[in-house]
Image: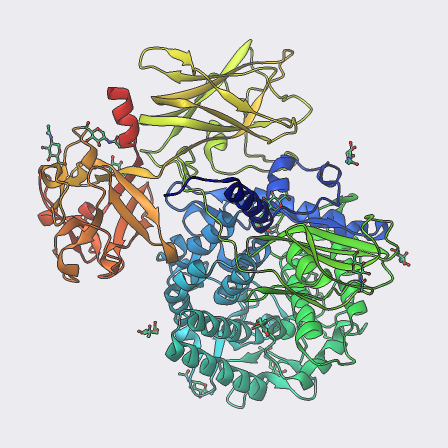
Amino acid sequence: MRAIGWQDIATLAALALSLQNVSGAGTSFLNHTELLADLENPEWFEQNIPFLDLPTNQSQIQDVYYYRWETYREHLVYTGAQYGYMTSEFLQPVSYGAPYGGVNAAAGHHINEGRWLRNLQYGQDVVNYWINGPGQLNKPTTSLDNPDTSDWAHEYSFWAASSVWRQYMVTGDKAFVVGQLDNLVKQYRGWDNHFNDTLGLYWQFPVWDATEYSAASYNSSDPYHGGAGFRPTINGYQYGDARAIAEIANLAGNSTLEDEYNGRADALQRAMQARLWDSELQHFMHMARDDNPTGVLLTSRELMGFIPWMFSMPQASDIVAFEQLTDLQGFAANYGPTTLERRSQLFMYQASSCCRWDGPSWPYETAQILTAVENVLNDYPPQQYISAADYITLLQNYAATQFKNGQPYVAEAHDPDADKWIYDSEDHSEDYNHSTFVDNVIAGLIGLRAQPNDTVIVNPLAPSSWDHFALENVAYHGHNVTIMWDSSGSSYNQGQGFKVYVDGQLRSNRTTIGLLTVNVGPVVPQTINPLVNIVANGQKFPLGTTPFASFTFQTDNVWNAVDGIIWRTEIPENTRWTSYSSPNGEDSFGVDFQRPQAVSDVRLYFYYDNIGVHLPASFDLQYWTGTTWTTIPNQQVDVSSSTSNTQTTITFPTVITSKLQVVAPNPGSGNGWGLSEFEVWAPAIFELQNNNSAKLMGVENESKSNNAAIQQYEDNGTTDHLWQFIRTTGGWYKIMNQNSGLLLSVQDMSTSDSAALQQYQDSGMEDQLWRVESQGSGLFLIRNKHSGLVVGVDGESMDNSANVVQFEDTGTKDHLWSILPAVPVSELNSTLN
Ligand SMILES: *[C@@H]1O[C@H](CO)[C@@H](O)[C@H](O)[C@H]1NC(C)=O
Ligand SMILES: *[C@@H]1O[C@H](CO)[C@@H](O)[C@H](O)[C@H]1NC(C)=O
Ligand SMILES: *[C@@H]1O[C@H](CO)[C@@H](O)[C@H](O)[C@H]1NC(C)=O
Ligand SMILES: *[C@@H]1O[C@H](CO)[C@@H](O)[C@H](O)[C@H]1NC(C)=O
Ligand SMILES: *[C@@H]1O[C@H](CO)[C@@H](O)[C@H](O)[C@H]1NC(C)=O
Ligand SMILES: *[C@@H]1O[C@H](CO)[C@@H](O)[C@H](O)[C@H]1NC(C)=O
Ligand SMILES: *[C@@H]1O[C@H](CO)[C@@H](O)[C@H](O)[C@H]1NC(C)=O
Ligand SMILES: *[C@@H]1O[C@H](CO)[C@@H](O)[C@H](O)[C@H]1NC(C)=O
Ligand SMILES: *[C@@H]1O[C@H](CO)[C@@H](O)[C@H](O)[C@H]1NC(C)=O
Ligand SMILES: *[C@@H]1O[C@H](CO)[C@@H](O)[C@H](O)[C@H]1NC(C)=O
Ligand SMILES: *[C@@H]1O[C@H](CO)[C@@H](O)[C@H](O)[C@H]1NC(C)=O
Ligand SMILES: *[C@@H]1O[C@H](CO)[C@@H](O)[C@H](O)[C@H]1NC(C)=O
């Protein structure tokens, strides 16, 4: 080896410089501090969102843009160490939701909206939650939660594959999207029982399209659910999903699957055109499934007839339908569009009481229709029926809709003609998360059209009469993309014209607003933090972390600070713990892990309402030594903002303890302090406790060899009882023994009942892939990918050294496991030393 000379150092310096560019410094033309001034925890938004700047007279769109990011963040629910994040629809969980409270009606919206966040974990967790996590679990089949489907991801119609594909086009994460291929095919085929072979179309009940009391529903004996019909909704969704699956199959190199799904898409396209297009009304319509031998279509146009354009499905000549969007007897409305054409006799029928989809303006469909118009203006030949100017009016109306008392706001549905929300119930509808807006601004208004290759296409629908606009540091394929228009050059001081920057460098420009195609270079892979939050216990699992406090205000609750949810301070029934009205000079809030944990990273979100609850003047983070509370030594506290709900990160050399608490003084006069959330982040290392025997999964004789048997044993403190969960693609885990470094496997890759589990080096085979399935109460099935069987104990034995095997899920108790965060081997060793 030769010594390093000056020349090498110069080369290294040049390399470092170019790496800096590659790893993507952004631009800083906008004043982020000012743009985030009204948001709680501005640091989170600085790290995650693209910055938007519009002309002053477009402030409604701009204000709603930042508000919608705020609502997006508050709907991120940390479910627990097993599944990470999901997105909620209502802030409060509803009775008809999946485990941890998810409702799939708007999951397609959530994935599309969240694809623009820099940290990929949120969006990818949401996808896993639905198509390889709790969404796949069995649900009841009652009229409350859909009698025709048996899992939560099919409770409502769901454009799953197309949204996962659209997410991929922004993130560029090929391994993730290819890893979801099997799951997406399964999700697609889950609608087979809604398919009529003769007609070549899918049917759905209006209510399971998330639209109750629609015009079509009133054309049945059950106006709440509506009668089953062949609808532009589900056929559009399945078409979009078929095309997306074909694209993903192509990425995976599976041309048979690609051809199959393109064939399905082509057939759906033809069948929908032939049967659901009303050539007189020039609109896609609902066709009742039952007692309708001649295929009569509904006679009123509904807004959902535009949904096929969300996927660019219809032929070009059908675009004439869009005339109705601007027609005053059609769907046009100042706070619209309306969900039913005005000329229908059913328009606004019974709409004074909730949840009519026969006229009221629903963000859910407005967002879908904006996406449809974006596609018409980008993917189709020029036409005379809908223009970019019409799009801007629709977007402005949608922004104007999202206000209440002068402040940005979204509830369920709005009066189409008056400035008022009509379905807006206290502690239920606030910040309703059932639509997109950010996605429309980015992909439509600013025109960032994500691509499945190294390019980005930029084609704004914003008019040239606007003297400036910018969208700064969009996370795209691991790069930072900035789009800017400055007609005079005086708004951003970067010269005149329309420009696209990649990683801080000007890459393409023109004098007028218009189409630019820019090569951004290869995808820069992103790494997702493998730590998990071991405190969140929103379901109050008995063996999970339990909160406690020295005092709790009567309408607050200690559990609120460990529920994985942080809401904006203004939300009435906020999810927080506070010491308001405490008689004490100081109060404490703590978490009991119920077992020792290695702790070094605590994140606190102090609540501050500027009335009776204040940020604590000081606080002390303490751990339980077994006999006393002691201040944790060498704490590094990172806090750079003083707004409510700001993340305060406290790191310190690892402490092993079963309890932590924060102690802080009350400000006096009955005022208190509060916490929206208490988090502890740790490696994903667990003990697996059998619910039948109470024994832990371990390795025979603590062996470190390939093929050693997996057994259960009482908790004797050996490190073969520790298992690390390592995420792979498609939501599957490898489970690695911490004593041997080998993976949980099935002997001889068997697919038979009672086959023994063993440990084996990483073979890349599917018998080493597992997923966990929540069964409630903190108990999980552990299912093998290759065999489809679950982990149990041979003969339901209660004994030490009984073999752990795979078996069909027969409901016995030995198939249930608690997955309990544990102290990693490295930390065990350092405390022993
Ligand atoms: C992009 O810019 C942001 C600042 O806005 C920065 O935090 C990030 O590291 C940059 N790079 C990438 C690849 O996102
Ligand atoms: C950005 O805005 C903040 C708040 O309005 C202001 O204090 C700061 O000076 C501005 N920074 C620049 C560089 O203009
Ligand atoms: C809904 O919540 C999710 C997750 O928090 C977020 O991605 C999405 O943008 C939110 N949507 C709206 C409309 O608030
Ligand atoms: C499919 O639709 C046709 C036409 O309405 C009907 O005759 C047939 O019974 C339907 N098939 C099934 C399996 O429901
Ligand atoms: C549904 O609409 C059709 C066509 O307009 C009509 O003939 C039928 O009577 C309606 N049925 C009900 C239940 O309203
Ligand atoms: C393509 O996908 C199908 C369906 O998942 C699968 O059965 C087949 O084995 C795959 N073919 C290849 C070449 O991977
Ligand atoms: C990128 O992908 C898009 C969509 O498939 C395609 O239209 C375009 O030609 C591709 N561009 C390049 C440079 O490959
Ligand atoms: C909004 O501002 C732009 C300049 O950015 C101007 O050209 C346009 O006429 C204004 N529109 C209205 C409705 O005032
Ligand atoms: C592109 O930007 C450069 C640098 O600002 C400028 O010199 C050039 O005139 C611009 N070209 C067009 C077509 O605007
Ligand atoms: C089995 O699970 C139930 C419900 O969570 C729990 O009450 C019980 O303690 C568990 N038993 C064992 C041995 O884990
Ligand atoms: C502890 O458990 C392991 C099996 O997981 C067993 O091999 C070992 O003998 C046990 N040690 C003691 C001291 O009980
Ligand atoms: C922990 O200590 C054991 C016994 O001294 C040793 O074999 C093992 O390698 C150590 N593990 C780590 C991760 O330090």
Q: Quadrant of residue 220?
A: bottom right
Quadrant of the frame with the C terminus: top left
Left or right? Give the position of 85 relative to 429.
left
Q: Is residue 169 visible?
A: yes
Left or right? Give the position of 396 relative to 648.
right
Quadrant of the frame with the N terminus: top left
Residue at 37 percent across and 66 percent down: it is 182
Q: Quadrant of residue 42?
A: top right
Quadrant location of ligand 2? top right
Left or right? Give the position of 818 relative to 208.
left
The image shows residue 118, relative to residue 575, as above or below, that is: below
Residue at 79 percent across and 80 percent down: it is 384
Q: Is residue 358 visible?
A: no
358 or 83: which is nearer to us? 83
Residue at 73 percent across and 76 percent down: it is 322
The image shows residue 458, relative to residue 617, as above or below, that is: below
426 or 190: which is nearer to us? 190
Residue 166 position within the rendered picture, expressed as x and y whole percent measured from the top left = 55, 63
Residue 293 position within the rendered picture, expressed as x and y whole percent measured from the top left = 50, 89
Left or right? Give the position of 636 relative to 329.
left
Residue 746 position within the rendered picture, expressed as x and y whole percent measured from the top left = 17, 55
Residue at 24 percent across and 61 percent down: it is 786
The image shows residue 749, relative to residue 292, as above or below, that is: above
Residue at the extreme bottom of the image, as rendered: 294
214 or 522: which is nearer to us? 522
